Amino acid sequence: MSGVRYQVSGDTDLLQVTQVVSDPDAMQQTGGRPRIESHRDLTVYQKALDYVDFIYELAESFPKRENFGMWSQITRAALSVPTNIPEGHARSSRKEYAYFLTLAHSSLMETETLLTVAHRRRYITDGQIAHGRRRLEEMSKMLVALRRKLIGDWKDTRKC
């Protein structure tokens, strides 16, 4: 890892940490907020891993003929979300980190489209798509908020 540390503040309901730094000096240096030491400290990363499990469970119900089609595409897109978060975190600049968060967000939106197609094909139920969309929307808000904290407004910085 590059040794770059990113502190995320504000929107505590969107950007929680899973580990709290117990060092009082570290807490004082960050204004009393826990420091993000690793991508594993980000709630959005943990939720993305859980989302992968959810997508794999859903995809198991797809017809066998979809094994090399939709099953493969939706699982790869879901896997891309949590894999881009640590890859970005390991980069040497906020701009690079933000770029990988954009990739994670794009993959998340790809899974939303594939969930819609699966629902339209009746591979998943109304309840399953509603649950998937709720989880997806929550992660989307977290990724956008994290990216904004790193480099500013989402729309103004998409070409980084």
Image (cartoon, grey):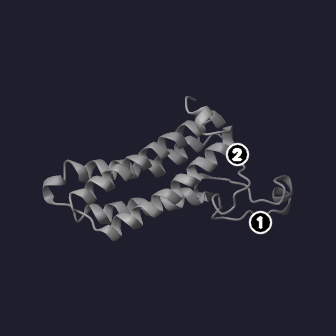
**Mark closer to the chain start, 2 or 1:** 2
* x and y, in percent, of residue 56 in the image: 32, 61
Amino acid type at circle 2 is Arg
Q: Secondary structure at mark 2?
A: loop
The vertical placement of 124 against 10, above or below, is below
Amino acid type at circle 1 is Ser
Tell me the quarter of the picture where residue 116 sits.
bottom left
Q: Which residue is mark 1?
A: 22
Q: Does 43 sit left or right of 108 as displayed?
A: right
* Nearer-the-camera pick, 20 or 81: 81
Outermost residue, left side = 65
Q: Secondary structure at mark 1?
A: loop
Tell me the quarter of the picture where residue 89 sits.
top right
Outermost residue, bottom side = 127
The residue under the point 24% across, 50% down is: 70
Q: Quadrant of the C terminus?
A: top right
* x and y, in percent, of residue 23 in the image: 80, 62
Q: Which residue is mark 2?
A: 5
Q: What is the crowding at mark 1: few (fewer than 14 residues within 10 Å), some, or many (at least 20)?
A: few
The vertical placement of 142 against 89, above or below, is below
Between the residue at mark 2 and the residue at mark 1, the CA separation in whole angstroms equals: 17 Å
* Nearer-the-camera pick, 35 or 51: 51
Numbered label attached to residue 76: none
**Badge count:** 2
The residue under the point 42% across, 48% down is: 109
Q: Does 85 sit left or right of 41 as displayed?
A: left
The residue under the point 55% across, 36% down is: 99
Q: Quadrant of the N terminus?
A: top right
Q: What is the crowding at mark 2: few (fewer than 14 residues within 10 Å), some, or many (at least 20)?
A: some
Q: Does 139 sit left or right of 6 as displayed?
A: left
* Nearer-the-camera pick, 92 or 111: 111
